[in-house]
Image: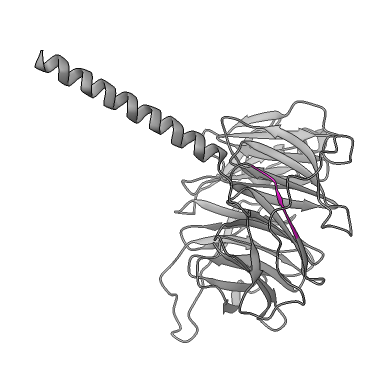
Amino acid sequence: VQLRSQLDNTAKQFTSVSEESTRLKRLIDEHRCEDGVTLSAGSFPIAPGAGIKPSTGEGTYHPSADGLFFIKVDPVQLNCELDVLELTFNNDFLFTGHANGFVNVWDLDDSAEHEQAVASGILGTNNTGRHRLLRTFREHTGKITDFVCNPAKLFTSSTDGTVRIWELKTGRCMTSMVREDKGMGMAPPRSAVNAISMDERDKRLVSGGADTYLCVWDVETQRAEFAHRGHTQPIIDLVKEDNFVVSIDWGRAHFWDLRTGKVVASVQDTFGGLSCVDYSDYKAVFGTRAGDLAVWDHRKGVSETICGHKDDVLKVQMAGRSCISSSGDYTIKMWDTGGADMLAMKSLGNFNESHPFETKCFQMEGRRFVAGQGQFVKIWSK
């Protein structure tokens, strides 16, 4: 009788704990910060009227507006066998980065001309066919964190503390770049490089990571020109356009002028929730851990914040007047930024729902949209 009584009590406690767990999970799913993300001017020089407003809502759905709804076909799907953390593509080759430090090179083109080029030995492969694995770069010893690609070279960053340059024609690793302490004449202890960026109009690459430094690299000499410190926490994302760089840490965004090496504007997320950024034509879009999208016009000092997703925003990309965002809520969404009047962001709706996989990385370029979802890569073409 005593044992049965103890069993009954244990069953009641288990039921109570299960009900409480279910209640807490429901509250987590339904929770939103009262004011959304609030970004305010930091201690650095700021543009007049700087500051990002609290969330103004989810925006207006416009299913007939221009966006990526021109893609009508089902995507081609590749199985990479490992979770895809980063991806990029250029010149009809797709590059995927993984947690074991491997960079896989895939054939992205099935044209007759490209088949002939692959068969002739470009990228050192004898494998031909549509969307096949061509080669694996294995030199990194930490997970891949970011890519930059141009027609001749691939730049990769990793938690092993290096930025590597690969020659695409031969698949050779040309160099491994590590930040040096010029005062000591030696490399400091390696820390993760979380993000790199470079634009085609410049021969400089910028990197940022756990050591809080923004490094500017000369791609020709493969040496660091400058190492600037403006952040007090690890840099988690950055983007470069001409002489301007926007970098973010967990709670602050800095706008850098590379001609002076100084921060010309700064905004702060009082809730500590920045997760990703993209920047074009003096306008920045920030993704937050609250699911919001915050848009800031650098020159005008005006802003808007909208409720974009129901979970962390994982990546944002600006493409002309469109903006794309992915989230831990398993959706990829499209936004109409209104062109020059970018702050009038309007939702174009969901482009793709990826449950049970989050879309940690994607890229839209020309006629293709490519997304990494779990161990799979999906390729849409128009």
The answer to whether residue 94 is above or below residue 187 is: above
Q: How is the image coloured?
A: one colour
Q: Is residue 154 visible?
A: no
Q: Given the current orientation, which residue lies at the most extreme bottom position?
A: 183
Q: Can you give x and y, in whole percent of width and height, for residue 190 in the image?
A: 43, 67
The residue at 73%/40% (across/down) is 333
| Quarter of the figure with the N terminus | top left
Based on the displayed image, in which of its 4 quarters is residue 282 positioned? bottom right
Between 168 and 227, the one nearer to me in the picture: 227
Based on the displayed image, in which of its 4 quarters is residue 202 positioned? bottom right
The residue at 57%/57% (across/down) is 273
Q: Given the current orientation, which residue lies at the most extreme left position?
A: 2
Q: Is residue 348 left or right of residue 220?
A: right
Q: Is residue 56 left or right of residue 127?
A: right
Between 316 and 169, the one nearer to me in the picture: 316
Q: Which residues are magenta?
A: 304-309
The answer to whether residue 179 is above or below residue 342 is: below
Q: Can you give x and y, in whole percent of width and height, for residue 219 in the image?
A: 66, 69
Q: Given the current orientation, which residue lies at the most extreme top position?
A: 1
Q: Can you give x and y, in whole percent of width and height, for residue 53 in the image?
A: 71, 61
Q: Verify whether residue 308 appears in magenta.
A: yes
Q: Is residue 162 visible?
A: yes
Number of on-image labels: 0
The residue at 55%/34% (across/down) is 375
Q: Verify whether residue 187 appears in magenta.
A: no
Q: Main secondary structure of the magenta part?
A: strand
| Quarter of the figure with the C terminus | top right
Q: Can you give x and y, in whole percent of width and height, for residue 222 in the image?
A: 61, 71
The residue at 75%/35% (across/down) is 351
Between 247 and 189, the one nearer to me in the picture: 247
Q: Is residue 337 left or right of residue 40?
A: right
The answer to whether residue 368 is above or below residue 221 is: above
